[in-house]
């Protein structure tokens, strides 16, 4: 949630990560429920996300940010950002039961930025 009480969406987090987020390669994975669950805005679907979740297939940060604009709500799932051909992600964004997102990273600047923009 933002300090002004508005909900936080994946697109808000991805916007906050610019430009580094667009330069990353992103993987989608299943959440704690064992599936990637989301809803899309009218006229769009989540087939693209369900097709790659858990496969290890990566998409560009710019592509993820564009597609995140079509998501109404991420219920459960994990988004991991990789730099170059790195085997380990530099950041994970995890959606929990459509209630909140967790941002996991060792990058203190990213954590400080998230704390500044969202209720922590």
Image (cartoon, rainbow, N blue to C red):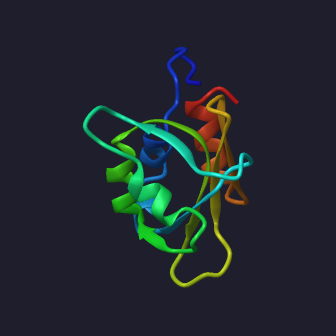
Q: Residue at x 35, y 51 (%)?
A: 67
Q: Residue at x 34, y 42 (%)?
A: 69
Residue 23 visible to the viewer = yes
The quadrant holding residue 47 is bottom left
Residue 91 image offset from top left, x and y in percent: 63, 60
Q: Residue at x 55, y 15 (%)?
A: 5
Residue 108 image offset from top left, x and y in percent: 69, 53
Q: As drawn, which residue projects farthest toward the top?
A: 5
Q: As drawn, which residue projects farthest toward the left?
A: 43
The quadrant holding residue 80 is bottom right
Q: Residue at x 41, y 48 (%)?
A: 46
Task: Specify whether 21 is left or right of 105.
Answer: left
Quick check: 92 above or below 32?
below
The quadrant holding residue 106 is bottom right
Residue 19 visible to the viewer = no
Q: As drawn, which residue projects farthest toward the bottom?
A: 85
Q: Locate the C terminus by quadrant.
A: top right
- Seen from the viewer's position, the closer of residues 115 and 64 is 64
Quick check: 30 above or below 13?
below
Residue 98 image offset from top left, x and y in percent: 61, 32
Residue 4 image offset from top left, x and y in percent: 52, 15
Quick check: 71 above or below 84?
above
Q: Locate the N terminus by quadrant.
A: top right
Task: Specify whether 24 is left or right of 63.
Answer: right
């Amino acid at each position: 949630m933002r300090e002004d009480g508005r909900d936080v969406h994946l697109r808000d987090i991805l916007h906050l990560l610019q430009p580094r987020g667009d330069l990353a390669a992103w993987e989608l994975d299943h959440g704690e429920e064992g599936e990637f669950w989301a809803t899309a805005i009218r006229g769009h679907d989540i087939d693209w996300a369900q097709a790659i979740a858990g496969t290890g297939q990566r998409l560009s940060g710019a592509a993820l940010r564009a597609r995140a604009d079509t998501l109404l709500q991420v219920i459960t799932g994990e988004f991991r950002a990789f730099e170059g051909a790195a085997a380990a992600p530099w950041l994970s964004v995890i959606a929990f039961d459509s209630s909140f997102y967790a941002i996991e990273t060792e990058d203190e600047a990213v954590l400080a930025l998230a704390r500044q923009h969202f209720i922590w």
